[in-house]
Structures are given as C-alpha cells and as structure tokens.
Image (cartoon, rainbow, N blue to C red):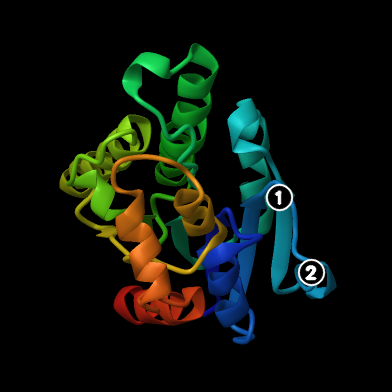
Amino acid sequence: MQKVFIITGANRGLGKAFVDVLIKNENHFVISISRSQSEEQKTFAPAYFYFLKTDLAENTLGKKLCLLNDLISNEEIYFINNASIIEPITKIEHLDEDAIDKMISVNIKSTMMITKYLLSHFNDHKLSFVNISSGAANRAISNWSLYCASKAFINMFYNVAESEYEQHKFFNIDPGVMDTNMQKGIRETDFPDASNFKNLHEEGKLKLPKDVALEILKTIL
C-alpha cells in the first residue's frame, strides 16, 4: 500500500532531505507544504510529489487543507512537522507583536491545524505524527524565548494527542544540531550561547540533514 508523507518546510534543510530520501520509493507519495520548491522538486512526477504552496506565517493554511481530501484515498499517512523559525533571537523586552504572531503561526498554529485536520478527516486511516522537536524544548536558552517556548508547546500538544488517540502514533524527535541554514543564522547572531554553536561547526560536529532524515525514517516506519 502506498504511504503518504505530508511534510512542512520541505524545500530546504531537513525537510528537503526527507523528500530526497522518500521520493526514491515508488510506493511513497510526498505532499510538500512549503513556500517554495527546490529546482529538483519541480521535476518530480505528480504521481509521487505534490507542492501545496503556503506561507505558514500568513494564516492561509486553513483554506488549503481541504485539498488533502483530493490527494489522499485510503493510504497510510505520515505528517512530518518540520517547518519552524527561530528568529528573532533577542531578549524578551525587545520582542514585538509581529514577531510573536509570526512565531505562533509558523511553529505552533500550523502544526495544530494540520494535526486537527488529519484527525478530523482521516481518523479511520493509520496515522503517524512526527514532530521535529529540539533540545530547546527542554532547555532554556537565553534570547531564544519564543523558539524554546514554541518547541515545548508542540511537544506537550503531541503528548496530549497521544493520550487522546491511542490508535495513532505520535513522535517528538530531537534531531540534534544539523548543518542547515538555520544553524548558519544562529552562528551569525550575537547571543550568550553563540560560541557553543560556533564550536560545534568548527569541530565538525554538525549532523548532515540526509543522515538525520534516514535515522528518523528508520524510527517511524
């Protein structure tokens, strides 16, 4: 039976790595919920890949989720909640309302809406929900208040969901520190723990997204 994978933020980093691995299996159908596609993704056959263009910061996702009903029949469904933003990296006193709203929309609200939609419309399917979490969900990092809080929020959201829907699978997975654009941005930002992240890069301790994707897929499949 074909498996459907719904992935947010699938155009780069870990999200793209998931697509690169999954698309090689003809029994997989990938739905990318992202702002854009990579050049390679534009060449994928529609039988295996669908691009649902959405900016999670703009609160338009709710109007587009109904498209899932046309794309999914009786397949097993995996939702990989990968998209997240870390900016702004700043002290709480400097946060503004727009930044708070954007973080909530991307890191929290979109995840809740997709999860709710799948449980409401595909509850008779075999569902797996995979939250790409972070060590920041359990550790307070100075200047990361929004990011830490948002990661902790979804961890608990999925813990509660697991208690409500025992027939489905819910995963909170910390992938570790990877070599991504997000990490590059972190290293270029001035905050108290910045040197730790710079050292990881200099010492070659950052994980490759493809390796992480393979490791996570072994866990959930």
- Give the position of the C terminus as an image quadrant: bottom left
User: Horizontal placement of 38 versus 170: left or right?
Assistant: right
On the image, which quarter does residue 217 sit in? bottom left
* Side (left or right) of 172 relative to 95: left
Q: Is residue 22 above or below residue 123?
A: below
Residue 173 on image: x %, y %: 29, 62
Going by the numbered disc 2, the residue's amino acid type is: Pro
Q: Is residue 170 visible?
A: no
Whole-angstrom CA distance, mark 1 to mark 2, is: 12 Å
The type of residue carrying mark 1 is Leu
How packed mark 2 is, by other alpha carbons closer than 10 Å (few <14, some 14-19, many 20 or more), is few
Q: Nearer the viewer, residue 46 or 203?
A: 203
Residue at (35, 82) in percent of width and height? 218
Q: Nearer the viewer, residue 2 or 24?
A: 24
The residue under label 1 is 52
Q: Is residue 157 above or below residue 215?
A: above
Q: Which mark is residue 46?
A: 2
| Farthest residue, direction bottom | 25
Q: Is residue 185 visible?
A: yes
Q: Residue at x 60, y 31 (%)?
A: 57
